[in-house]
Amino acid sequence: MIIGSQIYKRYPGGFEALKNISFEIAGGEMALVGGHSGAGKTTFLKLLSAIERPTSGSLVVNGQNLVALRPAALPFLRRNLGLVFQDQKLLFDRSALENVLLPLEIIGLAPREAQRRARAALDKVGLLAREKTNPIALSGGEQQRLAIARAVVNRPIILLADEPTANLDEESARQVLDLFIAFNQVRVTVIIATHAPQALFPPGMTARVLTLSHGALVP
């Protein structure tokens, strides 16, 4: 469960990226955060992942108030989160497998188990045969699927994605969205920021939509 109450996010100079937003997202829910460019979608995800903190208000993720969370507790919070960024943040001096292994190395998982889980994650996104490939040699869609494999290898209960289909062709976008749907079907909470939530899913597929406009949630 994620509960936000009267959240404001102000940046130096007085710019308010988020203004008095309150919301609830249930565990295992699929939620789309929509809105125009600059509406506050990326800021919203950064608050949920504790990359940034609210200026005021309350934000509770899995029973932890992120406003009051101590810095030492952040690594433990993020073990339950999978993050997929717009620019993917892949390491181009490492292979696909080594990119996926990184989160498991950080938490000190035994090498044999880490290798098993990393390969399982690559298999899930259809990239096991490319495990030795440098990400620079992958297509845009393959790079995005690699980023998803890295995000889910630690078996998160919440998966956050910022415009995950931006700049992808229709087929690659569908493959990426199918992955998010599959993770949600096994009760992973999936939250996707997108400028066009109504166009993101095929007819008959439902997801909750939170719409931001100039930093405020609108009906």
Image (spheres, rainbow, N blue to C red):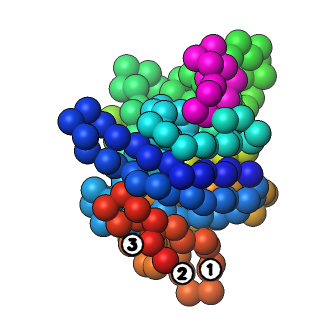
C-beta proximity under 8 Å, tags 1 and 2: yes
- The tally of labels here is 3
Comes first in the chain, label 1 or label 3: 3
Which residue type does callout 2 highlight? Answer: Pro
Res. 100 visible in picture? yes
> In the drawing, does residue 157 fall left or right of residue 35?
right
Q: Is the magenta stretch mostly helix, strand or loop?
A: helix
Amino acid type, label 3: Ala
Residue where numbered disc 1 is placed: 205
Front label number (2 vs 3): 3
Which residue lies at the image location 66% right of the left edge and 19% below the top edge? 73
Measured in 3D between alpha carbons, the distance from the residue under mark 1 to the one under mark 2, in whole angstroms, is: 6 Å
Distance (Cα) linking label 1 and label 3: 15 Å
Whole-percent x, y for residue 200 in the image: 47, 73
**Residue 88 horizontal/vertical position (percent):** 40, 40
- The Cα–Cα distance between marks 2 and 3, rounded to whole angstroms, is 13 Å
The image quadrant that residue 91 belongs to is top left
Query: Which residue matches tag 2?
Result: 202
Mark 3 secondary-structure assignment: loop
* Residue linked to disc 3: 196
Residue toward you, 20 or 198: 20
Q: What residue type is labelled 1?
A: Met
Q: Which of 87 and 111 is in front in this view?
A: 87
Q: As displayed, is residue 112 above or below residue 127?
A: above
* Magenta span of residues: 66-78
Q: Which residue is drawn at 28% across and 56% down?
A: 38
